[in-house]
Image: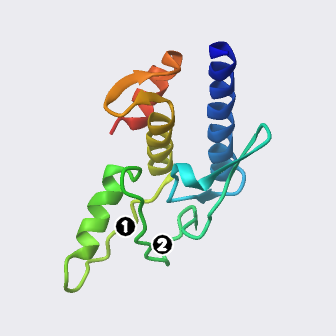
Amino acid sequence: RQEMILLRGDCLIAQMAKAVEFMHEHLNYTHNDIKPSNFFLSDDRVDLGDFETALVHGDTSRKLVAWSDGFAAPEVMEFVAEMRIPGPKPSLPTPYSCKSDVFSLGRVFKVLFMKGSGDETLLLPKFAPLLERMLAQ
C-alpha cells in the first residue's frame, strides 16, 4: 500500500511539473497563481487550470497584482507590498516569470508531499534536492 502511494506521488509530481513546463515552453505563458487548488486530478491525469492571471512572456502592458499567500515567490510578494503603498507608482517591472512559477510549484510540492503540519519530512525523500532548488532564491 505504501509503495503504491509513493509511486502515485512520483507520477503526480511529474505530471504537475510537465503541465507547468508545457505552459512555459509551448504556450509561452506564465501562470502567476500556481497553488494546489489550480491543479485538477481526474483518473490518473493532472491538469493545470485557472489561467485568469496568466501572461504571455514579456507582456509588460498589463500590470498584474495577483498572488496566493504561501505560494507566491518572494519577488512577487515584494512587488505586491510596493503596489499596496498609496501614491504614484514608479514603472516597476513585473516580477512574474517562469522562475516565480517554479518557486510556486515547489511550494505546492512542499504542502502536498510533506508528512504533516510542522513536520519537514518529505514523503518522497528523493525529491528533496529538487525541492530545495525550486525554493532557492
Q: Residue most toward the front?
A: 1
Q: Is residue 70 left or right of residue 12?
A: left
Above or below: residue 52 compared with residue 89? above
Q: Helix, strand or loop at disc 2?
A: loop
Q: Is residue 78 left or right of residue 121?
A: left
User: What residue is pinned by disc 2?
Assistant: 60
| 131 vs 9, nearest the viewer | 9
Q: Is residue 115 left or right of residue 39?
A: left
| Amino acid type shown at disc 2 | Thr
Q: Work out how far the residue at label 2 is from the one at label 1, CA to CA, in angstroms.
A: 7 Å
| Amino acid type shown at disc 1 | Pro
Q: Quadrant of the image for the N terminus?
A: top right
Q: Position of residue 54 (x, y in %)?
A: 57, 65
User: What residue is pinned by disc 1?
Assistant: 93
Residue drawn at the location 31% of the way across and 58% of the way down: 77
Q: Reading the chain from its start, which is encountered first: label 2 or label 1?
A: 2
